[in-house]
Image (tube, rainbow, N blue to C red):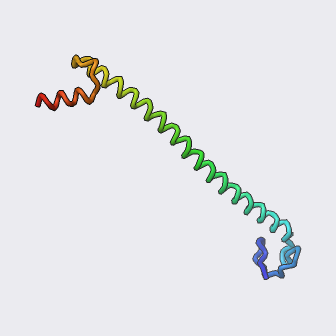
Amino acid sequence: MMFCKACGESIMDDCKFCPQCGENLQVVASLQKKNETIDKVKGVVETVASEVGSEIAKENLAKVEKVVKKKAKKITHKALVKLGVEKKNLADVVDDFKKRR
């Protein structure tokens, strides 16, 4: 037993038309299957888009980290030049600072 989607009448499973309102049950069933398929495809597309978005975000994060490190290195170098320790690396500067304290 199933029910007509148009009027809610209880009908036999093998009916092609609703005996109460005349609704074409084959068309309704076909549309229902198409909508279910569309929903499944939509879910897959959303999942793939989410995963691709995550990969793009990871790539962009790596680029940002690279730029930040490069900028930090330039800033560190400028600071060392101002301190008059242009040729030393940062570890040596830290060691010198610790010795002075």
Residue 58 is left or right of residue 49, and the answer is left
Who's the residue at 32% across and 24% down the image? 75
Relative image position of residue 47 (x, y in whole percent): 62, 53
Residue 12 in the figure: left or right of residue 71: right
Q: Relative to the observer, which residue lies in front, 17 or 90?
A: 90
Looking at this view, is 5 or 63 the one in front? 63
Q: Which residue lies furthest to the right in this view?
A: 16
Q: Where is residue 64 in the image (x, y as percent from the top left)?
A: 45, 34
40 w.r.t. 69: above or below: below
- Left or right relative to 65: residue 4: right
Q: Which residue is drawn at 79% across and 63% down?
A: 31
Residue situated in front as seen by the camera: 10 or 59: 59
Task: Please identify the quarter of the rendering in which residue 55 is found.
Answer: top right
Q: In which quarter of the image is the N terminus?
A: bottom right
Give the percent coordinates (x, y) of residue 100.
12, 28
Count of numbered marks: 0
Q: Where is residue 97 drawn, in percent x and y?
A: 17, 29
Residue occupying the point 86% across, 69% down: 26
**Quadrant in which residue 25 is drawn:** bottom right
Q: Could you tell whether 4 is left or right of 84 in the image? A: right
Image quadrant holding the C terminus, namely top left
Q: Quadrant of residue 34?
A: bottom right
Is residue 22 positioned above or below 98 on the image?
Answer: below
Task: Please tell me which residue is depicted at 47% across the width and 38% down the height of the picture.
Answer: 61
Q: Is residue 97 above or below residue 81?
A: below
Given residues 43 and 28, the one toward you in this image is: 43
